[in-house]
Image: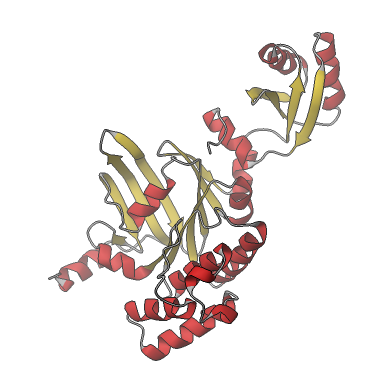
Amino acid sequence: MVNTQTVATDIDSAQPAGDEVIRCERLTKKYPENILAVDGLDMVVHCGEIFGLLGPNGAGKTTTVGMLTSLVVPTAGKALVAGIDVVAHPALVRQLIGVVSQTNNLDRALTVWENLYYHGRFFGMSARQSREAADRLLVEFRLTERAKADVMTISGGMAKRLQVARALMHSPSVLFLDEPTAGLDPQSRLALWEVLNKAHTEGQTILMTTHYMQEADTVCERIAIMDHGRILASDSPKNLKQSVGADSIMTISATGNLEALAKLLKERVEGVTGSQQLDGTIQLRLKGAWGVLPRVVSVAEQGGYNITDLSVTEPTLETVFIGLTGKELRD
């Protein structure tokens, strides 16, 4: 039996500082055969924000969420959710959080409405409270017409919305979303983020993982870019994109030795702050791009190179990631 007095004392002493709702200190997970999934992660998530863990598959995002939701036991370090030590009091943490996993884990023996109703009952809601909350969430998540349907008969987008609705049934302090839009069509993604943005405007704290750059850029207020179990950078999307030190990115396809051409352009074109080869192209980081395009073409031709394609875009989160890791996101 848990000593409730001791638990209460531990919770009181671990109350988050300010508006912190999640804190990780040197959080580490090492699997058998010396596989280091998460490597000394330090992270803070504030109350009421949408915080994104962005990175390729295998970066450690899902393992991090697993540790924060008490599903994975850390090898070392500390994790606090709402001031509660996740390892010391996992049952208390589970009462305070909502979790939406990558896979569809809806109860196939229940209808759409019953998945909500019994989830509420499981978390201590009265029959009346659970009925009212289930009815309300069906309306909010546009699932009313399928309330009595077998969950096996609804679309993937509806199933994901139902998972999110179920996770919100008991009004959790933090909602964890692991790759919430993976595999969804564009319409389903928009519908899902519509309801999540509504929850956010009402004060819901959301921590999500994703490998979709545009999604992280448009949805998250702050982002931590992860790879190989480590956070490489963390800030707002705007500040991260500004950190590349460029106003625009020029992508060039050309014949000949691309390494030599990249070096030539960096040396002879004013405004080029950096260059990099990527997927058979050259990427130039530019400051003050006005008039640079004809200069790039001229320098390339003078060097004996033939440019076959050229485009100019603003810096993106992918630009930041490649600048930090020197490679593209992995599938």
Quarter residue 18 falls in: bottom left
Residue nearest the observer in this picture, 124 or 236: 124
Q: In the rendered view, would you say 228 is above or below 171?
A: above
Q: Position of residue 140 (x, y in %)?
A: 58, 77
Q: Position of residue 316 (x, y in %)?
A: 66, 41
Q: In the rendered view, would you say 22 is above or below 30?
A: below
Relative horizontal placement of residue 298, taking residue 248 as reference (left or right):
right
Relative horizontal placement of residue 277, taking residue 90 as reference (left or right):
right
| Total marks in image | 0
Name of the residue lying farthest toward the bottom: 128
Is the image coloured rainbow, by chain, by secondary structure, or in one colour? secondary structure
Q: In the rendered view, would you say 75 is above or below 218?
A: above
Residue 302 in view here: yes
Residue at position x 62%, y 50% from top?
Answer: 217
Relative horizontal placement of residue 15, taking residue 62 as reference (left or right):
left
Q: In the rendered view, would you say 52 is above or below 116?
A: above
Residue 243 in view here: no
Quarter residue 154 falls in: bottom right
Residue at position x 55%, y 62% from top?
Answer: 156
Residue at position x 32%, y 62% from top?
Answer: 83
Q: Position of residue 82 (x, y in %)?
A: 36, 64
Q: Position of residue 291 (x, y in %)?
A: 86, 28
Locate the N terminus and report the quarter of the image it occupies.
bottom left
Quarter residue 323 falls in: top right
Residue nearest the observer in this picture, 285 or 90: 90
Residue nearest the observer in this picture, 311 or 187: 187
